[in-house]
Amino acid sequence: MTSPAPRRNRVCKRAVVRRTERITPHMIRVVLTAADFVDNGYTDHYVKLLFGKPGVEYAEPLDLGVIRATYQSEQWPTMRTYTVRNWDQDSRELSIDFVHHGDEGVAGPWAAAAQPGDVLWFNGPGGAYAPDEAADWHLLVGDESALPAIGAAVEQLPPGARATVLVEVEDASEEQKLGGAGDLDVTWFHRAGSTAARGDGLVAAVEALDFPAGDTQVFVHGEAGFVFRIRKNLFTDRGLSRDRVSLSGYWRLGKNEDGWQAEKAETATKERAAAGA
């Protein structure tokens, strides 16, 4: 008789809310103490946050292997991916920014209600991008979901490094001050009062840019629709090297993270099947 395979240990890391701050009308910064966080050096480093289902109690430390083996799937915690805005090694403070639109979603309402002492479990970090000091010019493009990564990136630019930053937000009240020692050219695009589709302004701005000579490093993250359109311009029209471009369409308008991940998985399966036909 074959013995069952050992359960994979999937113990999550524990963070405790220290304080919260309303950065803009729809952006909440939650600062947590995270003793087990390990910085990987990327400015787009992200964590997988676990939000428990109401009325369900989980043993601590939170172990996803145990939970998935002993709980019904509808009782599993909801997982959401968020970029780390800042990590302070000395104070062990982990800052994460949440977009909040009332009762919509899971993470935003949690952040709005978070109180000092609340516990949040997470996995990670992941990530793959950081500004290269050797680049002659940086281009960073995104919506409000990408602002934490963009903000972290420009703060790491070396003094005088040239960077063009294009960001789409709802209106002027959602703009944020971007710091750092780089030479920034920042343009904000507002959806409110505009008849353009989401991301149209970003796409048009990238297409109209006169890329300077030299080594260019590009970061484009946010809603999948505009990221895909900019991808075409960068690779097909401009012929940029893929190793100098960080692209991530990590959410899709009209879908939550679960729905978007399921759609991507289905598309990948169809593409593999077509390739093998």
Image: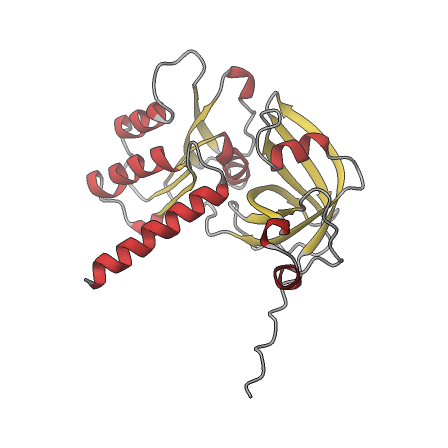
- Residue 224 locus on image (x, y percent): 38, 38
- Residue 267 locus on image (x, y percent): 32, 50
- Residue 114 locus on image (x, y percent): 73, 35
84 lies left or right of 211 = right
Give the farthest residue toward the bottom: 1
Give the farthest residue toward the top: 193
Residue at figure coordinates x 52%, y 50% from the top left: 42
Can residue 105 be seen from the camera position used here? yes
Residue at figure coordinates x 53%, y 41% from the top left: 156
217 lies left or right of 18 = left
> In which quarter of the view is residue 202 placed?
top left
Residue at figure coordinates x 54%, y 29% from the top left: 178
Question: In which quadrant of the rendered image does the N terminus lie?
Answer: bottom right
Residue 248, compared with residue 268, is above or below; it is above
> In which quarter of the view is residue 155 placed?
top right
27 lies left or right of 238 = right
Question: In which quadrant of the rendered image does the C terminus lie?
Answer: bottom left
Front residue of 103/124: it is 103
Q: How many marks?
A: 0
Residue 119, compared with residue 97, is above or below; it is below
Front residue of 68/170: it is 68
234 lies left or right of 77 = left
- Residue 142 locus on image (x, y percent): 43, 33
Can residue 134 be seen from the camera position used here? no
Front residue of 119/104: it is 104
Give the farthest residue toward the right: 117
Q: How is the image coloured?
A: secondary structure
Residue at figure coordinates x 37%, y 27% from the top left: 199
